[in-house]
Amino acid sequence: MYNIGIIELEGMEFKAYHGCLEQEKVRGNVFTVDFRGELDLSAAAESDNLNDTLNYADIYEIVSYEMSIPSELLENVAGRIVKAIEHRFPQLLRFSVRVSKKRPPVDGVAQWSRVTLTSTK
């Protein structure tokens, strides 16, 4: 029997230096990252053992590391995070990563720009 479940880690916040404009590379900006993963949680539901599930502290560590590497595009940042999570957690059936930039530099009012990538088996 399978208990497909969802593990989420939302609102991870970082000061980072992603963007195409020079001011973004120098001054930085506030970014948030959201993770949502689907996997079999049968063993963890029975055992109450961290080794039987996905440790979201490990997800945070991966995201934090990738956010520290400047990129011009949010697509590149999200892609690196997805690749690292795929490598570390092959038990994930499906997951998504959303990277958001606060107050993107546009000619007008915009609270966020966002990129979401989804990985499926």
Image (cartoon, rainbow, N blue to C red):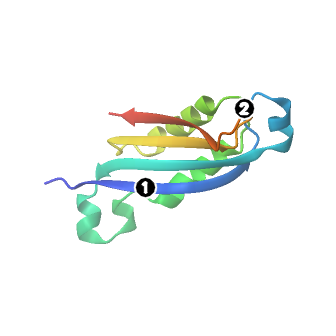
Furthest-bottom residue in this view: 48
On the image, the x and y values in percent for residue 40 come to: 27, 52
Q: Which residue is mark 1?
A: 8
Of residues 101 and 17, the one nearer the viewer is 101
Q: 118 above or below 35?
A: above
Tell me where residue 95 appears, x and y as whole percent: 40, 42
Disc 2 marks a residue whose amino acid type is Val
**Could you tell whether 111 is left or right of 88 in the image?**
right
Quadrant in the rendering for residue 106: top right
Q: Is residue 74 left or right of residue 21?
A: left
Task: Report helix, strand or loop for mark 1.
Answer: strand
Quadrant where the image shows the N terminus: bottom left
Q: Which type of secondary structure does the marked residue at label 2 adopt?
A: loop
How far separated are the C-alphas under marks 2 and 1?
A: 30 Å
| Amino acid type of the residue tagged 1 in the rendering | Glu
Of pointers 2 and 1, the one earlier in the residue sequence: 1
Residue 64 in the image, given as x and y percentages of width and height: 64, 50
Most distant residue in the left direction: 1
For disc 2, the marked residue is 106
The residue lying at 48 percent from left, 56 percent from top is 9
Relative depth, front residue between 74 and 65: 74
